[in-house]
């Protein structure tokens, strides 16, 4: 594991974006696993800049996002599809048909979970997975629990996650209580993982995830076992 402590959010964003840039340059037809949340916003901004400067071509890349809220369709401003379009996909030359997310309004969420795992497999797995971390150690929406959940699955969001994500909604009540998330299997099978972490409020959980026991109570702790993990963090 390679842990880079950097000084600022801007530096974290530039370095993580550079790693993604290098991945696309080295393998233009790569599969990128992407994340939502506040942390990657600066990374996507930098990728858009690189594209506008003519230094980054997304035309052969494919993306798979980690998760989506149940009950929100892509037109909902708080859906992760909407977020990804606005932060990245609308501004670079990637075909929308090659940008994949779980469908939050699928008639049968269990079937949707299976479809998503089959899709990821059919793409040959993920070359580079970008991750953030939740305050309780979740990655994607893999919440703390009794065991690591391997396949894509429907998850009941914990009260702390609902609270944390309520900042994007008018009230706690409006935050969906369930989501579909890629499981630990596809994340751990990614050939490279980049974990971006920003803010002093994430320092303790990052410390536990990287150096504490590997436990499903802190899903990100499983990343200690990943053979190619880069952590870029500015946690004070
Ligand atoms: C959400 C997302 C995660 C993200 C986490 C932290 O729960 N599902 O993928 O890592 O929030 O978000 P932030 O970067 O805003 O702290």
Image (cartoon, helix red, strand yellow):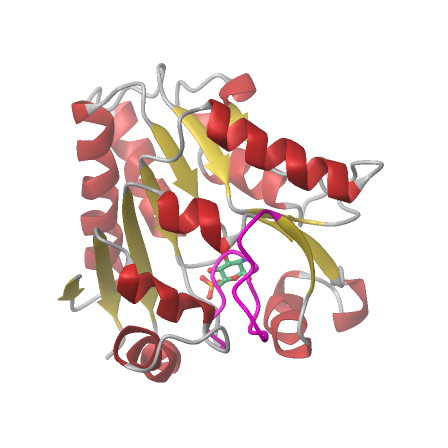
**133 above or below 69?**
below
Q: Would residue 156 be seen by someone viewing this image from the given angle?
A: yes
From the top left corner, tell me how far across and down residue 124 is, in percent: 40, 26
Q: Nearer the viewer, residue 106 or 189?
A: 189
Query: Horizontal placement of 171 versus 207: left or right?
Result: right
Q: Is residue 35 visible?
A: no
Q: Is residue 87 magenta?
A: no
Residue 125 coordinates in the image, percent (x, y): 40, 32
**At which x and y percent is residue 119?**
55, 28
x and y, in percent, of residue 134 in the image: 48, 69
Q: Quadrant of residue 215?
A: bottom left
Question: Split into 4 quadrants, where in the image is the C terminus?
Answer: bottom left
**Residue 137 colored magenta?**
yes
User: Which sits in the foreground, 154 or 23?
Assistant: 154
Q: Residue at x 43, y 20 (%)?
A: 94
- Magenta span covers which residues? 136-152
Residue at 54 percent of width and 21 percent of height: 96
- Work out whether 138 lies above or below 94: below
| Main secondary structure along the magenta-highlighted residues | loop
Quadrant containing the N terminus is: bottom left
In this view, the residue farthest toward the right is 107
Q: Using the image, determine if residue 95 lies above or below residue 21.
A: above
Left or right position of 90 against 49: right
Residue at 68%, 67% in the rendered image: 157
Question: Quarter-wise, where is residue 5 in the image?
Answer: bottom left
* Residue at image coords 59%, 47%: 152
């Amino acid at each position: 594991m390679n842990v880079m402590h950097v000084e600022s959010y801007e530096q974290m964003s530039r370095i993580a974006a550079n790693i993604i840039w290098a991945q696309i340059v080295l393998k233009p037809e790569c599969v990128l696993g992407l994340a939502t949340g506040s942390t990657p916003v600066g990374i996507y901004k930098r990728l858009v800049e690189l594209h506008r400067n003519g230094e980054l071509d997304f035309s052969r890349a494919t993306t798979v996002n980690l998760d989506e809220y149940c009950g929100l369709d892509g037109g909902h401003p708080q859906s992760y599809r909407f977020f990804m379009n606005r932060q990245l996909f609308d501004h670079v030359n990637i075909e929308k048909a090659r940008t994949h997310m779980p469908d939050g309004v699928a008639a049968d969420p269990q079937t949707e979970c299976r479809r998503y795992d089959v899709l990821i497999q059919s793409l040959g797995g993920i070359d580079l997975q970008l991750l953030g971390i939740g305050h309780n150690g979740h990655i994607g929406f893999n919440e703390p629990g009794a065991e690591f959940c391997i396949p894509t699955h429907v998850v009941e969001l914990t009260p702390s996650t609902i609270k944390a994500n309520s900042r994007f909604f008018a009230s706690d009540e409006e935050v969906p209580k369930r989501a579909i998330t890629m499981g630990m299997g596809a994340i751990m099978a990614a050939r490279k993982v980049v974990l971006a972490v920003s803010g002093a409020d994430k320092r303790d959980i990052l410390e536990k995830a990287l150096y504490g026991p590997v436990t499903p109570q802190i899903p990100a702790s499983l990343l200690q076992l990943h053979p190619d993990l880069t952590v870029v963090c500015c946690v004070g």
